Image (cartoon, rainbow, N blue to C red):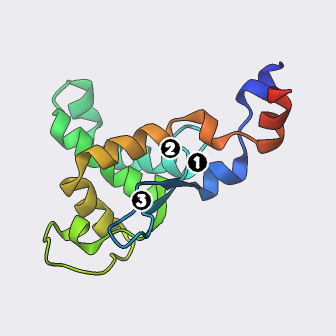
Amino acid sequence: MSLTQQFKSDEKKIQNGVPVYYAANPDQTIPTFYISRASTANKDYTKELRRTFKPHETAMRLKQLNDEKAGELLKQVFAKTVLRGWENVPKSDVTGNKEDTGYSEFNVENAMKLFENLPELFEDLQAQSNDAALFRNEDLEANAKN
């Protein structure tokens, strides 16, 4: 197997995203998140990382940027550039109010609220956005299996 077969990614998947499915909601709809690759291959992601962290360069160099602030900045970058959309996300998960019904519209503000309420979801989506296998070229994957 060549290195290309092992490492070449599908540029469309990197930029446009791939679906990530979770267990069904009580009404049997499937929460689905569309994520792009969080890597240097994703130009929007790297550009936004630089833009977001630039004002904090001195604090980072002096090791004065605390983990909480760095994590919040990273979530913002993720919500703006890696998370491309979602479907069937209960409004109650976004607001934290169990009485809210229906589904939440995807936008950066709602994504930040969802990640605040469900930090483990953010960590899982972030891990998956770094999983190169999700973004592999399907032709190369098929060849690799032969």
Foreground pick, 143 / 10: 143
x and y, in percent, of residue 99 in the image:
13, 77
Q: Nearer the viewer, mark 2 or mark 3?
A: 3
Quarter location, residue 1: top right
Residue type, numbered disc 1: Lys
Residue 90: percent from left, percent from top: 30, 71
**Residue drawn 54% across the image and 35% down it:** 131
Residue closer to the observer: 116 or 143: 143
Residue type at tag 3: Lys
Q: Residue at x 55, y 45 (%)?
A: 37
Q: Quadrant of the C terminus?
A: top right
Of marks 3 and 1, the one in the foreground? 3
**Residue type marked 2:** Thr
Q: Decide if residue 87 is on the left or right side of residue 101.
A: right
Percent from the top left, x then y, of residue 93?
24, 65
Q: Give the labeled residue for mark 3.
A: 80
Residue occupied by mark 2: 46
Circle 1 Cα neighbour tier, 10 Å, few/some/many (<14 / 14–19 / ≥20):
some
Vertical order, 44 against 144 (above or below): below
Question: CB atoms at circles 2 and 1 under 8 Å apart?
Answer: yes
- The disc at residue 43 is 1
Helix, strand or loop at mark 3: helix
- Secondary structure, mark 2, is helix
Tell me how far mark 3 sits from mark 1, CA to CA.
13 Å
Distance, label 2 to label 1, CA atoms, is 5 Å
Mark 1 element type? helix
Q: Residues within 10 Å of mark 2 (few under 14, many from 20)?
A: some
Query: What label does residue 35 carry, if any?
Result: none
Mark-to-mark CA distance, 2 and 3: 12 Å
